[in-house]
Image: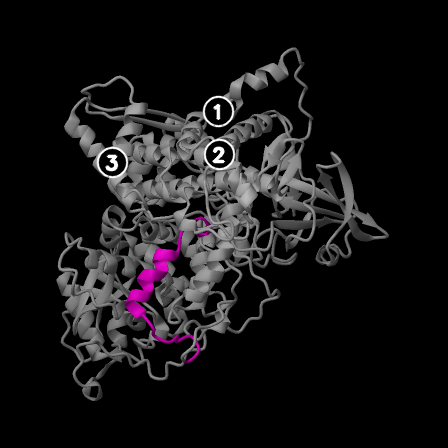
Amino acid sequence: MCFEHQIPARILEELEDCSTEETTDCHLISEFRPQDISAIDINGRIAKETAGTKATPPRPSKRVVFPGIHLAPEAHERRRWMMLRDLYRCTYKEFSWEILDRQFTKNTIITRFKVPNSQATRGDIVNRTAALLKRLPPTPLPLPSDIVQPTAELIAGCWLKVDANAYCWEKLSTVSRLSGGVIRMAIAIALTFERKTNTNGSSSESHNFREFLDFVSSLIDNVFFELEKGPIKKEDAVHNTWRWFVLLTYLWSTWHRCVALHYWRVLQDSLETGFDYTGFGDLGLRPNRGSFLTLELQQTVLSQQKSQYMCNFAYQVLQRSKSTSLLDMRQFHERFTEVFGERPGRCLDNKACSGREPDSCRRIRGAKVPEQSQHDISCMGEQACNRMVWNRTSYLKVSGPRAVSISSSSEQLCYKSADTETLAISHVWVHGQGGRPGEGMNECLHRRYCRIAKDFNCSSYWIDVACIPSEHDLRQEAILTINQVFSTSKATVVCDKDIMEIDISIIQDTGNISDASMALRESILAIVLVCDWNLRAWTLLEALRGRKNIQLLCRSGSENRLISLTETLRTVAFHGAIAISILLLTNHHLFPPPSAFHWMRTKTSRQELSKLQHIIFDTSFDADRVSGRIGRGFVAVSEAASLLGQRFASRPGDDVIIWSLLVDDPVIKNANDLWARGRHGIERLDKVVHTGHLLSSVQRLNSRQGPSWAPRQPGPYLAANEESPTSTLYPPYDGIQSQIGLIDIGKEGSIYLRANWGVATIRFHNGYASFFQSFQHSKNQLVDECVPEELVKYLEGYNEGKLLQPLQREGTRETYKGSCASIYGGYGGVSKGLIFAVCGRKNNNVMWTWLGVIDWGTNYSLPCFEEEEIILE
């Protein structure tokens, strides 16, 4: 980041510019929110245009608009366009970066800071803001270099001068300098750095941050639209693409840095109070054309620079995780490489896998573990290390959850009841720590866990190798107790091959924040995100249940040493690279859950309850029960599926069992029963589902199994002996910012989904799907276009068809008044284009059948969508 010596002065300038009446009150007030687009009127031009005109009533139907797609010039778009033209004017050669920055800040942001008159306090705020800004990456992610081709003529019309043949991204002043918007958001965070998180200020602030970021994101899309026109000369005016590109880099740099600051604020709150998945909307930001382009660029460039040792499939899972497409992965790669350097891959012998699916990687499937013979780092003689098997009699004498007793002197594993003094061990089976209780584990491993258990003042330890027998009935009984074991254990120790190789000798204590110590902590977090342990479905369940105290087993020289995951993340979050720490938000199962008391206090306030009651609360249970479930770490059916959608289980059927254990204690083996709990008189826990969650390629229940819309498993990855019906996989996401659908149960027990969607109608000809309608702005009319061949195949045998797209939940983002319904932010993963659901209907049936999803790509025009209620059988 250039001009670092000027940052304190810039901060003080922005602070003074936004300060209100000074006070000695210890409560610092911070307000940062976007201007209301309906109130923006550059030079009074809107007022002049609308003078004497009559307002036109809105159409009865709501046309759907998409992020990243240029919109028709409706009233609010006219205001946005005028503001954008005003910013474009500031790129003219007679102006400067300072004028552009001042105009943008004045027209788009409302900021109000109230600070004490103490110079010392002001100095603390400036220092805290500067420290936060300096932990951002020096420059935002670069946009593709081929967006614009600068010429001497175009450059001459702008104040930003570069070589006409090429330019350096890092040296563009619009990229290297911190805008007023970035500095003001950082000040807003610094002013309330030590706020009480049990107040509702965090919710209001996050909403304001999101509103601002989504507004800037829409401006970025509008600039891309102007750039696509290319250089145009009309009379004496020139449509200067270089000037538009300069404005684009300014907006992109502001947006990208502010995204990191916003995510960091969410991370700070999550570390203080626990991560609340019902507030996941804080992370759901509006994507834009730039974010899609940089995602592609990161996938191409960084994948080429990626360490060969990093599993490509693990990296792809991380890239497909929530919100990763908006984040900067450069420092992540640097920190991973610093530990594993030039090591060859180990997915396929000495090579990395393709990353396309689990079956392509032997780290995940097909790895040979002939004897389950892993030894501890301290084991002096592997030949003399005895094998310890279970004492079956001791196991059967204990009822309920069992754990290995550390006080027994027997040569066999003896058992006691698992309780709050049990140490839970979470490991990767293919790393070879043992088979099943009858096969046993090496004595050195038993001694290792006994030593660790004693260090935590525990009397027992639990590990599946010793505590889940292979006998069917005993295995099922043990699985039923996993939730209890991990949720009540004193600590959960993570044993992963890669993590265990990290030497943490230089981290002497939690207060050590030297550069070398901080870099190693950042490397630990990077490795955790893509390690084998973080890819498994069973270990995800164990992490979610035991996340109140997760300890990573590393080494210090030739000795075992533990380091707290939460403390490592906390240290990096407050002292290290922001780009590294906020990546952990994509893996919220690693955060401690909020307490029931905190959740109850914040979510039942008048402001929050109005937003959540239609999603969480219904007549079947009250806030006490909801807060209790969240406090114990349980999640909703769709959120559990979203977590598991990026992971896999080896045994067929295990993924549904894990799915049910993430939702509640009773084990359910059938997905239809999971969606329809309550059909037979049992109290229903989940009566709604976010429509955005359903937008995935996960296989659905067939007509014999249940409703066509309901996923029959949490994710698209199948067990090792099953074959996927499709070559392209689109994992599910929580869809928490999309509108909800109501799960209804009919008189005969049938389950159907009622929801509002963005709907595009497919027209048939001679019994086949043939046409859809798109809106052509140049003609200002709807035109017929031929449908893709894939869609024709989907709708064979049906006489009606529709495309479905989730809609934005009311009140979560910028709303489009009048004839438009805001579209949900789109599919959260990697795709060629927008993802639509396909449904069909026969013989004028009331209900529609879910048929699958289609990647619309870029070869076809966007269909015209309107809001409509759809009932799916």
Determine contact: label 1, label 3, CB under 8 Å.
no
Task: Locate residue 453, reporting x and y percent.
Answer: 17, 64
Q: Mark 3 points at which residue?
A: 8
Query: Is 399 located above or below residue 202 in the figure?
Result: below
The quadrant where residue 706 appears: bottom right
Query: Is 716 located above or below residue 758 in the figure?
Result: below
- Could you tell me which secondary element the residue under label 2 belongs to? loop
Q: Looking at this view, is 4 or 835 the one in front?
A: 4
Query: Is 316 located above or below residue 625 in the figure?
Result: below
Instruction: State the mark number for residue 93.
Output: 2
User: Any magenta on residue 336?
Assistant: yes
Of tags 2 and 3, the one toward the viewer is 2
User: Is any part of residue 842 visible from this angle?
Assistant: yes
Q: Looking at this view, is 790 or 108 the one in front?
A: 108
Q: Which amino acid does label 2 sit on?
A: Lys
Instruction: State the mark number for residue 47.
Output: none
- Could you tell me which secondary element the residue under label 3 belongs to? helix
User: Is any part of residue 113 visible from this angle?
Assistant: no
Q: Give the range drawn in magenta.
A: 324-349
Q: Which residue lies furthest to the top in this view?
A: 52
Left of 244 or right of it: where is 14? left
Q: Mark 1 points at which residue?
A: 36
